[in-house]
Amino acid sequence: MPLSFVIARYFAYAFAAVATAWLASFMALSAAINAGFVYEASWGPANAREVAEGLARDGVCGQQDVPTAYRYLILNKDGYVLMTDLEGTRLEGAAEMARAALAADPGTVEIEGGGSGLTYAAFPLKGGGACALVSEYLPQWVSRDLAGLLPNPQNLML
């Protein structure tokens, strides 16, 4: 058998193995989404208004109140940061929107696209202050414990 056929055969085996591994990880991610362990990539942007309205109505006591599909910034009534898990340019964009939301009427939710798959939602809180939510168009773990332990679900496919 010529050497070129041997090389081609092993190339085909390697390609089949990579395709099988990718298919298995895709099926695992789909099963996790269907089982409710993972938010699908569009969940954060699609539900930003409903989540913001609920948080504005019920208040935010800590990160446990914010779904894991969102990063958050909470300002007090004077515009100072109380809690956040944001940093860098996302923090700057969220702070700008949250400060604008301090002057907004209760029940108002301002939603803007931040580019690169980001969605910002800002709203005033019931007891004073404001909150900004930032969602990225990526699947996220539903559980904060899993989100803290494991990489982003989409990264498991890579």
Image (cartoon, grey):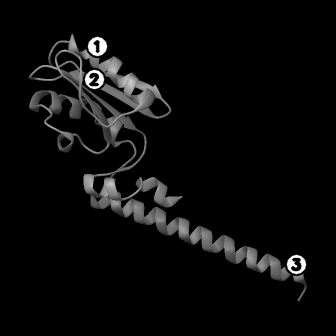
- For image coordinates 22% across by 30% down, the residue present is 52
Give the residue pinned by disc 3. Answer: 4
Give the mark toward the camera: 3 or 1: 1
Quadrant of the rendered image containing residue 97? top left
Q: In the figure, 14 relative to 68: above or below?
A: below
C-beta proximity under 8 Å, tags 3 and 1: no
Give the mark toward the camera: 3 or 2: 2
Gap between marks 2 and 1 measured at Cα = 8 Å
Could you tell me residue 8's position as x and y percent?
80, 76
Q: Earlier in the sequence, mark 3 or mark 1?
A: 3
Gap between marks 3 and 2 measured at Cα = 61 Å
Q: Secondary structure at mark 1?
A: helix
Q: Secondary structure at mark 3?
A: helix
- For image coordinates 75% across by 74% down, the residue present is 11
Q: Which amino acid lies under the numbered mark 1 shown in the image of this protein?
A: Ala
Q: In the figure, 131 relative to 140: above or below?
A: above
Could you tell me residue 129's position as x and y percent?
17, 20
Q: Secondary structure at mark 2?
A: strand
Furthest residue to the top?
A: 103
Q: Is residue 154 left or right of residue 72?
A: right
Quadrant of the image containing the N terminus = bottom right
Q: Is residue 41 among what the camera can see?
A: yes
C-beta proximity under 8 Å, tags 2 and 1: yes
Q: Earlier in the sequence, mark 2 or mark 1?
A: 1
Give the residue pinned by disc 1. Answer: 100
Quadrant of the image containing the C terminus = bottom right
Q: Which amino acid lies under the numbered mark 2 shown in the image of this protein?
A: Ala
Give the residue pinned by disc 2. Answer: 122
Q: Is residue 143 among what the camera can see?
A: no
Quadrant of the rendered image containing residue 7? bottom right
Q: Which amino acid lies under the numbered mark 3 shown in the image of this protein?
A: Ser
